[in-house]
Image (cartoon, helix red, strand yellow):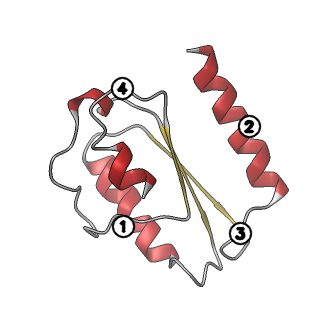
């Protein structure tokens, strides 16, 4: 949901955090993208053992974003569909960078 709605949001966002998510459009970007968020940083994280949202779905989204010229930081973790301390540390660093902008 964060990718789908964030990429379409009509006002500039400080960032889009995409945790264990995918694009419903698969390996292509959704229609009606907002120019306001063309350069918005995207943090995309996914669990290597995610049994809810397959890693392949997250990878397809990442590849579509990179091909589309978006600024994506991709990180994977040895976890299922959850959150772990190492991931929270990276999220914290990323959020602090957004506040410094």
Q: Is residue 1 placed above or below 47 in the rendered structure? A: above
Please indicate whether residue 24 sits to the left or right of residue 87 in the image: left
Q: In which quarter of the image is residue 60?
A: bottom left
Any mark on residue 12, and which? 4
Please indicate whether residue 97 sits to the left or right of residue 9 in the image: right
Determine crowd level at label 1: few under 14, some 14-19, many 20+ residues with C-alpha closer than 10 A.
some
SS class, disc 2: helix
Q: What residue is pinned by disc 2?
A: 92
Residue in view at x 72 percent, y 33 percent = 93
Q: What residue is pinned by disc 1?
A: 60
Foreground of the two, 6 or 65: 6
Q: What residue is pinned by disc 3?
A: 82
Of the two numbered discs 3 and 2 on the same chain, state the one appearing first in sequence: 3
Residue in view at x 34 percent, y 64 percent = 23
Q: In which quarter of the image is residue 76?
A: bottom right
Camera-nearest label, 3 or 1: 3
Determine crowd level at label 2: few under 14, some 14-19, many 20+ residues with C-alpha closer than 10 A.
few
Which residue is situated farthest in the bottom direction here?
A: 51
Foreground of the two, 66 or 18: 18
């Amino acid at each position: 949901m964060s990718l789908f709605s964030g990429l379409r949001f009509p006002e500039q966002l400080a960032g889009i955090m995409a945790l264990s998510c995918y694009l419903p459009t698969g390996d292509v970007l959704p229609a009606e993208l907002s120019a306001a968020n063309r350069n918005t940083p995207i943090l995309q994280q996914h669990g290597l053992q995610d049994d809810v949202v397959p890693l392949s779905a997250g990878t397809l989204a990442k590849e579509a974003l990179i091909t589309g010229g978006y600024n994506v930081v991709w990180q994977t973790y040895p976890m299922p569909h959850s959150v772990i301390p190492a991931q929270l540390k990276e999220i914290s660093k990323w959020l602090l960078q957004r506040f410094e902008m």
